Image (cartoon, grey):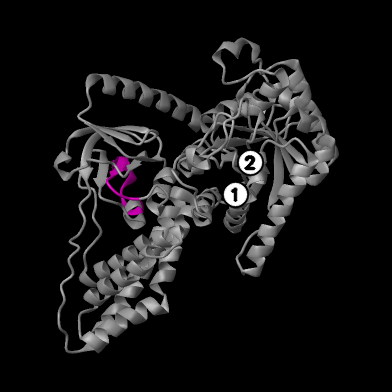
Amino acid sequence: MKLAGKSASAGVAMGPLYFFHRTPGQVRRRHIDEPKAELERLGTAKDLAFAQLGELYEKALVEVGEQGAALFEVHQMMLEDEDFISAIEQIINTESVNAEFAASRAGDTFAKVFSEMDDAYMRERAADVKDVAQRLVNCLTGETAGSIESDIPVIVAADDLSPSETVQMDKTKILAFVTSGGATNSHAAILARTMGIPAVMSAKGLDASMDGRFCIVDGSTGEAFVDPDPEQTERLSKKKAEEESHARLLEEYKGKPNKTKDGIEVLVYANIGRPSDLGLVLQNDAGGIGLFRSEFLYLERDSYPTEDELFLAYKTVAQTMAGKRVVFRTLDIGADKRIDYFDLPVEENPALGIRGLRLCLERPWLLHSQLRALYRASAFGKTAIMFPMVSSLWEVAKAKEIAEAARKELEAEGIAFDPSAEIGIMVETPAAAVISDLLAPEVDFFSIGTNDLTQYTLAVDRQNPGMEKYADTRHEAVLRLIKTVADNAHQHGIWVGICGELAADLTLTKRFLEMGIDELSVSPASVLKLRKAVCDTELGS
């Protein structure tokens, strides 16, 4: 039986389903005669909960790093929030009830307030409030959080998992997570990706009656197979073996510098399209993200995302990368990427029509909402903004004008952002490559999109299978344009990268390094292969 859900963390896992057992959630109301004694109990429980969160922070720091661990500092802040604690105390005093009932009631009330907020990020904080309230209740009642009572590793199934539950579990017993609820951008999902544990959320059909049955989880597709048939088992077993082989390569090169034998260094970054890809970036030890494709935030829905929804996605990526540079490409819709609700006109040759930055300049409100969201996210990590499909100076000037307007609005509204966030362009038209000496003074970096640069330079439709033999990505004309762009970038003191598929062509790694390319951005699965190629290269030979 296939359970279709949402991909939260990539990877394949096989094993028995284990439904997570929690402590009873029902908190009984008891009348008390001495509110003072209950307030003292509350104070003691609060101190204990605070200490537990401190221990969880230290544990998470080791397992998932500072950004993942920071959640438990946030929970400590919630625990000390005067409004929250005062609400509990008021219930105890006015209703003469036990502290655990008051804590549970206040937690439900505050969680409801958060869940009804317009901001998507704030709505997700409802789960954090419930988590903190439940911890207080557990400390008051002496109950402990649920554990995995199994002698063998299992696929943990649940309706949802709180961040605390995720971190407190014994990792040696977890093969994967499958939940019937939960958001793919929740803290639990982020922690699962960071820990490298496959996870599927919102799995339809997941039921407690499946407890103990054999299951295969494919986190990359968001599917779980309960009692899989032989074909599914064989296919996913092969996929799992390939992943394990790659993992061995990961262990060998993880942490090594991207440095040639003669000491030349290059940045090796990853290309992704969704926040759910972050786990792969971290697992493969990429130095940053060289291309985040914003269009996927639009392609996977049937209406325009709001600024807050964009902000949440951008913030998740920036925050999870913990200070490593993330290059966010603004919307690149058009050509082969079509969206019905955009209502784009039918074009005889869409590859040469309204796409990329052109579309955003025709509909400036589209770019404006992205830029506001991106600048808001810049307060949470090292972000860079990149405009696609540039061919003229005036396009860059207009885009920068819209960016300036977004910054001024945020400043006037008192919203934090990084005013020094880099602005760059993709060089994917021959025009941009030829005038790169004029474009370089206007931006902070170039990133060369070799897929389209090849298409436009060779006049070959890259979507046409019949033209494949003519689409020579290693054509000397393409390589000479790349060299021109690199030279012009360096002459004007800016860095240059390659984010197209050509960056992963290991037969060209040495040539790119000889050109002085500063950054190569590839799919997460290619990061370690590229690192090995760099380490094996000697430019003097």
Q: Quadrant of residue 36?
A: bottom left
Under circle 1, the secondary element is helix
Q: Is residue 389 above or below residue 195?
A: above
Which quadrant would the C terminus be assigned to in this image? Answer: top right
Q: Residues within 10 Å of mark 2 (few under 14, many from 20)?
A: some
Q: Give the spatial CA distance, label 1 vs label 2.
A: 9 Å
Q: Is residue 295 above or below residue 12?
A: below
Q: Is residue 180 magenta?
A: yes
Q: Residue at x 66, y 28 (%)?
A: 352
Q: Is residue 201 magenta?
A: no
Q: Residue at x 58, y 34 (%)?
A: 334
Check disc 1 and report the residue beneath it: 366
In the image, is 366 to the left or to the right of 434?
left
Numbered mark located on residue 359 in the image: 2
Q: Is residue 243 above or below residue 495?
A: above
Amino acid residing under circle 1: Leu
Residue 381 visible (yes or no): no
Amino acid residing under circle 2: Leu
Q: Quadrant of residue 110?
A: bottom left
The numbered mark, 1 or 2, whose residue comes first in the sequence reads 2
Residue 496 is situated, as x and y percent measured from the top left of the image, at: 73, 36
Under circle 2, the secondary element is helix
Q: Tell me whether the residue at label 1 lies in contact with that at label 2, contact meaning CB atoms closer than 8 angstroms.
A: yes
